[in-house]
Image (cartoon, helix red, strand yellow):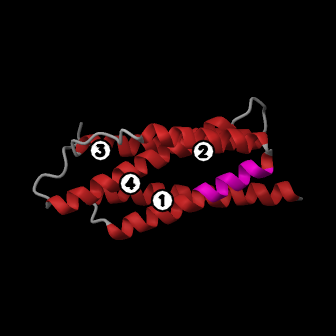
Amino acid sequence: MDEFRMRGEGMPLGRLRKIKKGLRKLHTLELMAQTIYKCQIVGDDSELNRYLIVAMCNEMTHYQDFQVKLCEYGWRPSCLRWMYWIVGFFFGFFSKIFGTKMMLRTGIWTETLAVKGYGELLEKIDWDDETRKIIEGNWSDEKGHVAQWKNFLQAYKR
């Protein structure tokens, strides 16, 4: 119980609007990311498959982080988030059809966009301290995903 609290009281309306928009954006993008990985996972016992499962789990944690923050502020997720699920499905499913190299390139591309997006939101929005820490931690995870998929791609090219 001590980890959760209601947020936003006494904050200016303009600041709250920016926080709401940022949290909704992060929440929907994390839905897309976890869906991509869910659709790329195959049933084999490969190292890549294990990393895809770990990445999916990590993105699910991020999604949950932003769900909690939205609730703490008294807001609901975007009603359009289902579209991000569909986009994630298409990126994940079709990259899997085109093979391992395409899956890795899709991962690098989407995670690079995530790193850029997190950086912009951290710079532009005046977050509360606890939320900022979570966003910075998740941002660090996304940077790790880019490096991870690049390493897999290099190994795959050999």
The residue that mark 4 highlights is 134
Residue for point 66% across, 58% down: 108
Q: Amino acid at mark 4?
A: Ile
Q: Nearer the viewer, residue 127 or 12?
A: 12
The residue that mark 3 highlights is 70
Confirm or deny contact between disc 4 and disc 1 (CB under 8 A). Answer: no
3D distance between C-alphas at marks 2 and 4 = 17 Å
Mark 3 vs mark 1: which is more N-terminal? Answer: 3
Residue for point 39% across, 44% down: 65
Which segment did they paint magenta? Answer: 101-110
Confirm or deny contact between disc 3 and disc 1 (CB under 8 A). Answer: no
Mark 3 vs mark 2: which is more N-terminal? Answer: 2
Instruction: Determine whether the residue tagged by mark 4 lies in a helix, strand or loop.
Output: helix
Confirm or deny contact between disc 1 and disc 2 (CB under 8 A). Answer: no
Outermost residue, top direction?
A: 43
The residue mark sitting in front, 3 or 1, is 3
Q: Main secondary structure of the magenta part?
A: helix
Instruction: Determine whether the residue tagged by mark 1 lies in a helix, strand or loop.
Output: helix
3D distance between C-alphas at marks 3 and 4 = 13 Å
3D distance between C-alphas at marks 1 and 2 = 14 Å
Quadrant occupied by the N terminus: top left
Instruction: Determine whether the residue tagged by mark 3 lies in a helix, strand or loop.
Output: helix
Image quadrant in which you'd find residue 55: top right
Label of residue 139 in the image? 1
Q: Is residue 99 magenta?
A: no
The residue that mark 2 highlights is 55
- Percent from the top left, x then y, of residue 14? 19, 62
Confirm whether residue 81 shows in the render.
yes
Q: Residues within 10 Å of mark 3 (few under 14, many from 20)?
A: many
Q: Residues within 10 Å of mark 2 (few under 14, many from 20)?
A: many
